[in-house]
Image: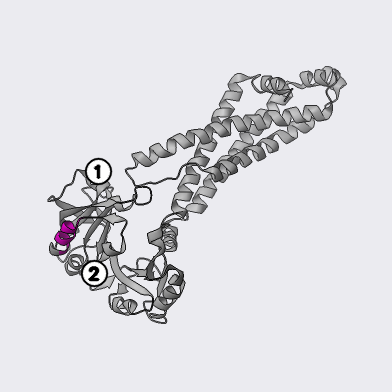
Amino acid sequence: MKYLHLIWASLFRRKTRTLLTLVSIVTAFLLFGMLDAVRSSFSQAGQSANGAARLQTGAKLSFIQPLPKSLLGQIERVDGVKSVTHANWFGGAYQDPHNQVFSFAVAPNYLDLFPEVAVSQAERKAFAETRTGALIGERLAQKYGWKVGDHVPLQSQIFPDKTGSKNWQFDIVGILHATDKKTGGFFDQMFLLNWKYFDDTTPYNQGSVGWYVTRVVDVNQADRVAKAIDALSANSDHETRTQTEQAATASWMKQLADIGLIVGSIMGAVFFTLLLLSGNTMMQAVRERTSEIAVLKTIGFSGRSVLAMVLAESVLLLLLGGILGLALASVVIPAVSAGSGGMLNLPPVGAGSWGLGLALMLLIGVLVGALPAWNAMRLNIVDALAGR
């Protein structure tokens, strides 16, 4: 620590270059913090006490393949099953195809399996009795200014009605409220319509089900129940795959995009570029100080001391930028979550992210400082002072 003033002075010898390098490091670790939060958010999808007691059964081949409704009664008779419901993806958009709405056609008992969604009994009754009725999430209602009693048109991106039109009409009869805003942001964005209305209106469904949701009696028996459900359709033309809610959500997302691979690829490119940039900065900084390093050796600094100071300078550069970047991510992430209206529930930068980030700072700092530090240690005093 007694040489810290020398290290600091060397680091900011060229202030503009150092500040520009620091901006690059801050940006890299800001991206690291945010992308790690995105990865964590997707990996935690479906993780909840209620979700642990739910299983999702979809087609084994692809999540877009429908299943026969006749499976419902068979699943209900499986030992360990408490209740079963079903749903279909509707694929709705409001006014413009870009305004996608998470819309599902659901069975009358769908909400019975999701206690983390609150809706009044009067609204549940209105939903069951209104053929074109719809229940919408609280944040979705706020986003478009919808309220109970409104007549809302949705354009299905997948299903036309019997006339061939993809324009559907719905009457809002209730508002859904997520009881846990941290894990239930998705429910605040949902648009639920009656499965019977959907099935009767489009000629492309004809009694099919998108997926089944099963609530088990005992969470510890979930694996056995899942295997028993899949055995019902083994060797048929509609084989199923039953998973926990978390696994099913992860599998569904992976069919759309491998979030882990995408995040890893982006961060690999970012840190490789950072390695080259900061390495170039350190090489130039040491090369410009050749005569100064020679003077240090002349007045008694050992080669190892010089090596340690150059390495410390490199590590300090990465730590300054990295810590600022992660601190900035800690501020930006809650703002992004709040600004998304519940669509994104990004976890804060936790101890794991800080630990991994600090390890990366130290590793990159040592890597970029190793070669210039080695050259500085081996520097010949006579050649350096002679300008050779």
Quadrant containing the N terminus in the rendered view: top right
Q: How many marks?
A: 2
Measure the alpha-carbon separation of dots 2 and 1: 31 Å
Question: Which circle marks residue 204 in the picture?
Answer: 2
Q: Residues within 10 Å of mark 1 (few under 14, many from 20)?
A: few
On the image, the x and y values in percent for residue 181 come to 34, 47
Question: Which circle marks residue 143 in the picture?
Answer: 1
Establish if 6 lies above or below 78: above
Rendered residue at 24%/73% (across/down): 207
Q: Residues within 10 Å of mark 2 (few under 14, many from 20)?
A: some
Task: Identify the colour scheme used.
Answer: one colour
The answer to whether one can see residue 168 in this image is: no
Seen in the image, is 173 located left or right of residue 45?
A: left
On the image, the x and y values in percent for residue 93 come to 25, 52
Quadrant containing the C terminus in the rendered view: top right
Rendered residue at 54%/43% (across/down): 351
On the image, the x and y values in percent for residue 6 come to 71, 20
- Observer-side mark, 2 or 1, equals 1
* Front in this rendered view, residue 94 or 132: 132
Seen in the image, is 192 located left or right of residue 65?
A: left
Where does the magenta region start and end?
A: 120-128
Q: Amino acid at mark 1?
A: Lys
Residue 222: say if magenta. Answer: no
Q: Secondary structure at mark 1?
A: helix
Residue that lies at the very extreme toward the front in this rendered image:
218
On the image, the x and y values in percent for residue 222 come to 43, 70
Seen in the image, is 309 located left or right of residue 248?
A: right
